[in-house]
Image: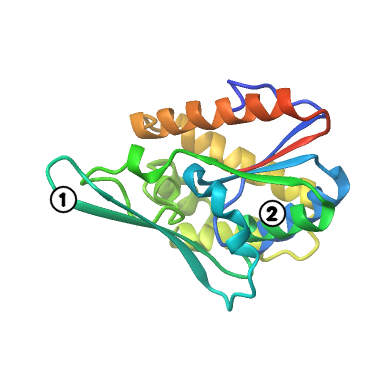
């Protein structure tokens, strides 16, 4: 994404792991420091007309469920779950507190769904299945990706928001450089980049992107 749109003081990206408490805290901290005009979140674009439903008095966890029938009549559903420590959930509520516009910017499920597309849209498939991860786990003396993430991001309560973002960015950059990016993800990134450009033209204030 950063190759498509260069970050500026009016465009801030927060790379997150879904359901990460540390990333949720970072989202809140940066949102209140930046006070964006619009918050763009990795979520199903076609749900934007119903975003207000997410602000009803829900008992978490909840999920958005999308459903489509493919050309071969196969049925495919996908869910986008939220809990109290989801960065996306924190972004939704920080935006409302700050009076910012909120939009989901990921491709709609009906444009993505195939027999092979993961139905759990916040399950970190690209992080867990990358060949770089076993090498880094061995180097740091941990067993798996979850332990690696905890070691780098979650455990130290003194890590600043900036330091957490530096670590997440470095990790994701190495992961991306270590394997071929699936065509599906390239399509999604192009779609999200277009939504970001649209927001930049539409709003004079800062744009915060949570993906």
75 up-or-down from 54: above or below: above
Query: Which disc, if any, is residue 91?
Result: 2
Residue 119 position in % (x across, y down): 33, 54
Query: Mark 2: which secondary structure?
Result: helix
Task: Residue at 56% x, 25% y: name it.
Answer: 194
Residue 72 position in % (x across, y down): 12, 43
Question: Callout 2: few (<14), some (14-19), or many (20+) C-alpha neighbours within 10 Å?
Answer: many
Query: Which disc, if any, is residue 206?
Result: none
41 up-or-down from 5: above or below: below
Query: Mark 1: which secondary structure?
Result: loop
Residue named by callout 1: 74
Alpha-carbon distance for marks 1 and 2?
A: 34 Å
Task: Residue at 24% x, 43% y: name it.
Answer: 114
Considering the image in quadrants, where does the C terminus appear? top right
Task: Residue at 74% x, 60% y: name it.
Answer: 25
Q: How is the image coloured?
A: rainbow
Considering the image in quadrants, where does the N terminus appear? top right
Residue 151 position in % (x across, y down): 61, 60
Q: Which one is nearer the viewer's eye here, 13 or 133?
A: 13
Q: Would residue 138 appear left or right of 198 to someone viewing this image?
A: left
């Amino acid at each position: 994404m950063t190759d498509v749109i260069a970050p500026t003081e009016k465009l801030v990206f927060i790379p997150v792991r879904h359901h990460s408490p540390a990333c949720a805290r970072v989202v809140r901290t940066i949102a209140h420091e930046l006070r964006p005009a619009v918050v763009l979140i990795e979520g199903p674009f076609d749900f934007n007309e119903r975003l207000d439903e997410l602000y009803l008095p829900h008992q978490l966890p909840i999920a958005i469920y999308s459903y489509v029938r493919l050309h071969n009549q196969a049925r495919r559903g996908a869910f986008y779950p939220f809990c109290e420590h989801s960065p996306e959930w924190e972004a939704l509520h920080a935006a409302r507190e700050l009076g910012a516009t909120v939009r989901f910017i990921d491709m709609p499920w009906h444009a993505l769904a195939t027999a092979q597309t993961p139905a759990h849209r916040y399950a970190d498939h690209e992080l867990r299945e990358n060949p770089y991860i076993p090498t880094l786990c061995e180097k740091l003396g941990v067993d798996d990706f979850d332990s690696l993430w905890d070691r780098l991001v979650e455990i130290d309560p003194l890590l600043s928001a900036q330091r957490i973002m530096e670590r997440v960015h470095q990790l994701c950059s190495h992961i991306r450089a270590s394997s071929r990016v699936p065509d599906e993800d390239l399509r999604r990134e192009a779609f999200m980049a277009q939504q970001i450009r649209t927001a930049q033209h539409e709003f004079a204030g800062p744009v915060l992107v949570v993906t």
